[in-house]
Amino acid sequence: MADQVLFEELSHQLSAVGAVKRELGRNLPPDCPPGSAGVLTILKHYGDMRMSQLAELLSVDVSVTSRHVSHVADRGWIKRSPDPADKRASILHLTDNGRGVLDGLSQHATDLLTDRLHDWDDDDVRELIRLLARLRDSFGECRANGKAAHQQSLPSPTNASS
Amino acid sequence: MADQVLFEELSHQLSAVGAVKRELGRNLPPDCPPGSAGVLTILKHYGDMRMSQLAELLSVDVSVTSRHVSHVADRGWIKRSPDPADKRASILHLTDNGRGVLDGLSQHATDLLTDRLHDWDDDDVRELIRLLARLRDSFGECRANGKAAHQQSLPSPTNASS
DNA sequence: TATTGTTATACTCTATAACTATA
DNA sequence: TATAGTTATAGAGTATAACAATA
């Protein structure tokens, strides 16, 4: 348990992350805004899933996810297959086309980070990843209260294409 | 220097921070959106400054900063004083009124973080703050290339009210 | 001529609420 | 009745460009 001064400072630093995120979101293909990139990234990372699961992993409302999904589906970057277990739902699947787009995005992000973080060593990067993931868990638990079933049914992160 | 897999993961985790920021931005007073809170926070943290410096610290364009500043100035939370050294510029100053609003915001953020991060210890919080600050520096340096003068003229962070 | 700051415009992201179809 | 997704609406953030005043 930390004290108030630390929490104020953390709050401050979290706000500043926005600039980094915007920088990472620049120079994307015109048809691929950050929201679309997020969809593709999650699908590659975790594999096929339903809309509701994707929304949970993106940490945004299902309605928002629906629009992003439509955007990438219109461009053939993902495919919506009917879910045999529930006719209301669809299974979202990253297409080869989408995988190609994602490879470009990934390369762009890597290039930028390679430049900006040239003086970081692996341990610091790993530590930052670990703490951000934990931060997200700490905030996400309460949101998933009482309906943790989907966590179990989610596939583990698998970089299927690499 | 880290490798591509780490950078992809970092990019992914950074995206997820948005949910935490939105959670922190909820339940603010109706007249104080996150952008206003950012202005007040920076002014308390660093002291009086000009619009351009504030924009730099917020990591957004001056035009955006101008709008946020107008919003909080209209409500008497900051004061714009003419800059004796340059008639085009103003010095932004946090008022007592604004300090009061900020105390409320700060309390809200602290309460939320106290709840969510109840199982974190100080060291992990400090480490996350350190890495986020460094991340910001790594991205900020390039932006200030060739015009680093303002960095020297900025007062050091001082929690003037605490 | 260059710089500080303001304003108009347009784009993206987000949540809420109402709605359809299925469970 | 409850849940999966879609769509319409509205609010907030941001950047670009054109502009006024001053350096």
Image (cartoon, coloured by chain):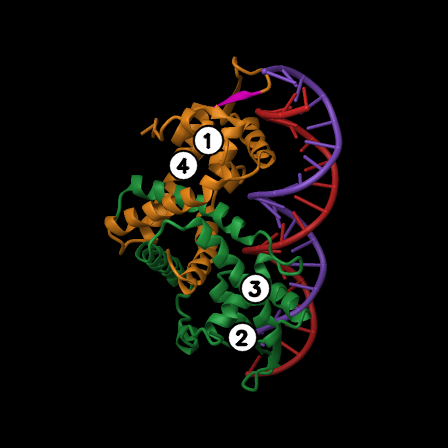
Chain colours: A green, B orange, C red, D purple
Question: Mark 4 = which residue?
Answer: B104
- Inspect the magenta stretch and tell me whether residue B127 lies in it: no
- Inspect the magenta stretch and tell me whether residue B93 lies in it: yes
Q: Which mark is residue A8?
A: none
Say which of A142 and B55 sits in front. B55
Are the numbered discs 2 and 3 placed on the same chain, yes or no? Answer: yes
Q: Is residue A109 left or right of residue C20?
A: left
- Whether residue B96 appears in this view of the structure is yes
Question: Mark 1 = which residue?
Answer: B148
Amino acid type, label 2? Arg
Q: Which mark is residue A104?
A: 3
Label 2 sits on a secondary structure element that is strand
Are the numbered discs 2 and 4 placed on the same chain, yes or no? Answer: no
Say which of B21 and B100 sits in front. B21
Are the numbered discs 1 and 2 placed on the same chain, yes or no? Answer: no
Q: Quadrant of residue D17?
A: top right
